[in-house]
Image: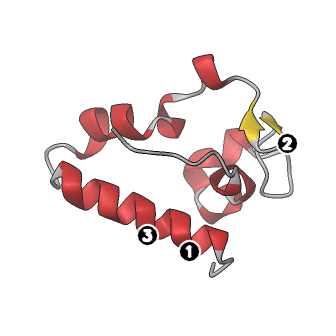
Amino acid sequence: MFVCDRCGECCRHLDLSPLYRDLDRGDGTCRYLDGDLCGIYDTRPLICRVDESYEMFFRESMSLEEYYRRNYAACAAMKKHLF
């Protein structure tokens, strides 16, 4: 299971991918972000669910370990504002 530290950085950089366009409130931040937490966590979209997205979209193209490595690397870069 992907371990999230709930910093909210991924929800503050939606402008990095067109996949999140519908969630962007216009400044790159998710319209459902409340502080550092998701205001609709239990009903958040599939693209916001790391483990479920792997099963649905990436399982055939990479290992779970590689998928997690890429997600953790993106997470670290967002925290350091490297994008």
**Alpha carbon separation for disc pair 3 and 2:** 23 Å
For label 1, the residue is 77
Q: Amino acid at mark 2?
A: Gly
Q: Which mark is residue 21?
A: none
Q: Residue 13's x, y, as percent?
A: 69, 60
Q: Earlier in the sequence, mark 1 or mark 2?
A: 2
Across and down, in percent, residue 51 comes to 35, 36
Quarter-of-image position of residue 65: bottom left
Relative to 52, does residue 19 appear above or below in the rendering?
A: below
State the residue position of label 3: 73
Label ID, residue 35: 2
Three-letter code, disc 1? Ala
- Name which residue lies at 53% across and 63% down: 75
Secondary structure found at label 3: helix
* Horizontal relation, residue 68 to residue 5: left or right: left
Q: Secondary structure at mark 1?
A: helix
Instruction: Return the residue nearer the eye: 76 or 50.
Output: 76
Comes first in the chain, label 3 or label 2: 2
Whole-angstrom CA distance, mark 3 to mark 1, is 6 Å
Display coloring: secondary structure
Query: Residue 41: x, y in percent?
Result: 64, 25
Query: Could you classify mark 1 by the number of other residues whose Cα lies within 10 Å: few (under 14), some (14-19), or many (20 or more)?
Result: few
Q: Quadrant of residue 52?
A: top left
